Image: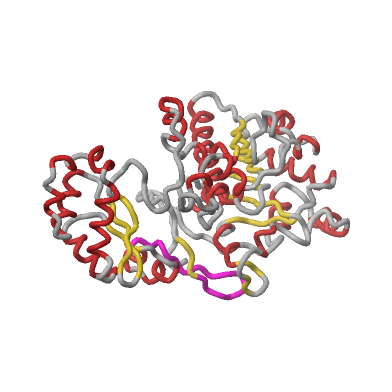
């Protein structure tokens, strides 16, 4: 955050109630909030969203929380109580969007299914993220992002051939579901505005969000009976595109374009391969990928990562190193594009956090407020829906709110 005023975002005026916790639902809420939506996050009194306590903790709060919940307001509300559910209904009645990632049937058990909520608010758009979706034989099974990654086909392809499948190191299943959910919200908002004012449900299953980005996995099986297998750092069927060992690390080289391949071979002193008619297109190179990879690594191995990158960048061959968090924070390109931001916390610290994606040049996103402490906005939000100070005090006394 800076002292420069941030203009209203593209979603300014959009009212969102977020009932999700941890990653999938809240990431969708974060994305909307970054672009100006007013997101009221409902959390359980006392404990709040478990993400507050995940991974590395600063002054009792996860630094991850500072990113996931920036630009949001927090109300501590007991949704298991009838009074808490009534307050939630009043909030939802005035909202454009409701985000939830409970197990299917949870809201229905509270009398807060879409049929009941849309009767209060016909324009309501409801994003529901769950492990297996709201229908189907698996709907009631517990499902986390890791399981969605496995069922969606991703885990089978990660890692080295013949080794134990590995995860990619982040909760990619959850964030893919959140991004698909955000796209669904924007589609539903357009439909509501352009075609009659009704809301609708967006049903996102974790495994389906993963499956949707799995490229030609099923068509290849359907047409040829081919089951794509793990291939380590290579991209099967595309050559050359791999990670290559250097003196002090690894570089990734994407030399699979026909003209790029010729420039790559010229740079590494292998014009014999670059001018070989049999290697003029990708199909030919795939047949001899082991030979090509060996030639590239014979050139990269005695050189530093920096030297390899300098040479290949000069030849206009796509090349990159494997970045760590330290590399990202120190990279001038990240800084130049405002992808590392200084964000204050409510405890008085300043944390460097990821910037805003995507970049809208006319109505840019921004960090308008730090992530809230639990219940920071309870009283203000309750006053906005018409409760008096006496009513709020009574609810607090009965531990319905905090």
Front-lying residue, 4 or 222: 222
> Which residue lies most toward the right here?
398
Front-lying residue, 86 or 186: 186
For the record, the magenta segment spans: 337-351
The residue at the point 52 percent across, 73 percent down is 350
Where residue 165 appears, x then y in whole percent?
A: 54, 51
Tell me, yes or no, whether the highlighted magenta stretch contains residue 333: no
Tell me, yes or no, whether the highlighted magenta stretch contains residue 345: yes
Where residue 65 appears, x then y in whole percent?
A: 60, 62
**Is residue 94 positioned above or below 367 on the image?**
above
The residue at the point 64 percent across, 35 percent down is 133
Where residue 84 appears, x then y in whole percent?
A: 80, 47
- Colouring used for the render: secondary structure
Count of labels shown?
A: 0
Q: Is residue 314 left or right of residue 283?
A: left
**Is residue 41 positioned above or below 86 on the image?**
below
Quadrant holding the C terminus: bottom right
The residue at the point 42 percent across, 31 percent down is 220
**Is residue 256 positioned above or below 67 on the image?**
above
**Is residue 172 positioned above or below 206 on the image?**
below
Where residue 344 appears, x then y in whole percent?
A: 53, 70
State the image quarter where residue 331 is shown. bottom left
State the image quarter where residue 250 is shown. bottom left
The residue at the point 39 percent across, 64 percent down is 323
């Amino acid at each position: 955050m800076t002292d420069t005023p941030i203009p209203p975002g593209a979603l300014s005026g959009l009212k969102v109630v977020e009932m999700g916790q941890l990653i999938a639902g809240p990431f969708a809420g974060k994305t909307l909030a970054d672009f100006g939506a007013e997101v009221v996050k409902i959390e359980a009194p006392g404990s709040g969203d478990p993400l507050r306590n995940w991974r590395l903790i600063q002054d009792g709060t996860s630094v991850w929380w500072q990113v996931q919940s920036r630009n949001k307001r927090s109300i501590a509300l007991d949704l298991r109580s009838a009074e808490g559910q009534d307050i939630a209904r009043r909030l939802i009645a005035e909202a454009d969007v409701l985000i939830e990632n409970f197990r299917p049937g949870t809201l229905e058990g509270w009398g807060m299914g879409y049929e009941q909520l849309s009767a209060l608010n016909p324009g309501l758009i409801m994003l529901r993220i769950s492990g297996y979706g709201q229908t189907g034989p698996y709907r009631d099974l517990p499902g986390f992002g890791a399981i969605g990654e496995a069922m969606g086909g991703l885990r089978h392809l990660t890692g080295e051939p013949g080794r134990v499948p590995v995860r990619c190191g982040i909760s990619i299943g959850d964030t893919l579901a959140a991004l698909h959910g955000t796209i669904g919200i924007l589609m539903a908002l357009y439909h509501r505005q352009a075609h009659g004012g009704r809301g609708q449900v967006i049903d996102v299953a974790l495994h389906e969000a993963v499956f949707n980005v799995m490229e030609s996995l099923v068509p290849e099986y359907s047409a040829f009976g081919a089951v794509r297998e793990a291939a380590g750092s290579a991209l099967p069927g595309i050559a050359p595109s791999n990670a290559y060992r250097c003196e002090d690390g690894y570089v990734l080289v994407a030399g699979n374009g026909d003209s790029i391949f010729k420039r790559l071979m010229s740079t590494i002193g292998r014009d014999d391969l670059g001018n070989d008619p049999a290697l003029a297109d990708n199909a030919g190179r795939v047949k001899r990928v082991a030979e090509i990879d060996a030639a590239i690594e014979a050139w990269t191995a005695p050189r530093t990562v920096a030297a390899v990158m300098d040479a290949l960048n000069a030849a206009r061959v796509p090349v990159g190193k494997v970045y760590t968090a330290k590399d990202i924070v120190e990279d001038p390109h990240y800084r130049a594009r405002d992808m590392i931001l200084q964000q204050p916390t409510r405890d008085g610290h300043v944390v460097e956090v990821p910037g805003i994606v995507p970049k809208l040049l006319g109505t840019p996103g921004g960090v308008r407020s730090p992530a809230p402490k639990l219940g920071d906005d309870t009283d203000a939000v309750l006053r906005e829906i018409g409760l008096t100070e006496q009513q709020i005090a009574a609810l607090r006394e009965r531990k319905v709110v905090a």
